[in-house]
Image (cartoon, rainbow, N blue to C red):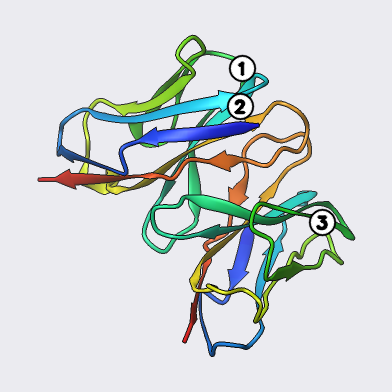
Amino acid sequence: DGGITQSPKYLFRKEGQNVTLSCEQNLNHDAMYWYRQDPGQGLRLIYYSQIVNDFQKGDIAEGYSVSREKKESFPLTVTSAQKNPTAFYLCASQPPAGTEAFFGQGTRLTVV
Amino acid sequence: AQSVTQLGSHVSVSEGALVLLRCNYSSSVPPYLFWYVQYPNQGLQLLLKYTSAATLVKGINGFEAEFKKSETSFHLTKPSAHMSDAAEYFCAVSPISGYSTLTFGKGTMLLVSP
């Protein structure tokens, strides 16, 4: 089945540690996105990539980094510079000349 | 610039009652419009989308939405609520131009009581 896979579903880390969230898609979509979701704030765009080896900052990129070495993969690293990393993170992809985005099941990150 | 406003962070209805979730958008160019649903600890699932064809759009699970350009609205409705409709609903907008990031509203939690 085609889709977007995020792993892990739950992630716990100590404050000050970097952590990488995985996002893999087999839909052959060019564009991929990372959103952060906090209660009552909707979805906020962290980074997006429309082609391999290229990515752009979204609205809340500070404290995050990404890479796009393969079309299928768009990992997100939450660095120690992110002041409030505890949140639900959603990865999405979009087909060429597409309209809607397709979402993974999310990763809930808790920093203690 | 584009933005989305969803009126009401929470909406409560009784099972069998009409569901109405409000969405107003602001966009400098004609937009695409979407409604997504999210169940707890899940990703977002597309309910329906408006892509400049028919203004009344039918989606999954009996939901529909009407695009009203004069009111810059795209309200979501369902004639009869079911307990399984309890979830969070997001309205989103994107411009009609190639790859475009979606801008989301803050979401409306739909509560359905028996």
- From what the image shows, is residue A69 above or below residue B73? below
- Find residue A98 and report its horizontal and vertical position in percent: 71, 36
Q: Tell me the quarter of the image containing the C terminus of chain B.
A: top left
Badge 3 density bin: few <14, some 14–19, many ≥20, Cα 10 Å: some
| Residue A99 in view in this figure | yes
Q: Position of residue B77 (x, y in %)?
A: 32, 27
Cα separation, mark 1 vs mark 3, equals: 29 Å
Amino acid type indicated by mark 2 = Tyr
Q: Chain of mark 2?
A: B
Q: CA distance from mark 1 to mark 2?
A: 7 Å
- The residue located at (76%, 65%) in the rendering is A73
Q: Nearer the viewer, mark 1 or mark 3?
A: 3
Amino acid type, mark 1? Ser
Label for residue B32? 2
User: In the rendered view, does A4 fall on the left or right side of A26?
Assistant: left
In the picture, residue B99 is in which quadrant?
top right
Say which quarter of the image contains residue A6. Answer: bottom right
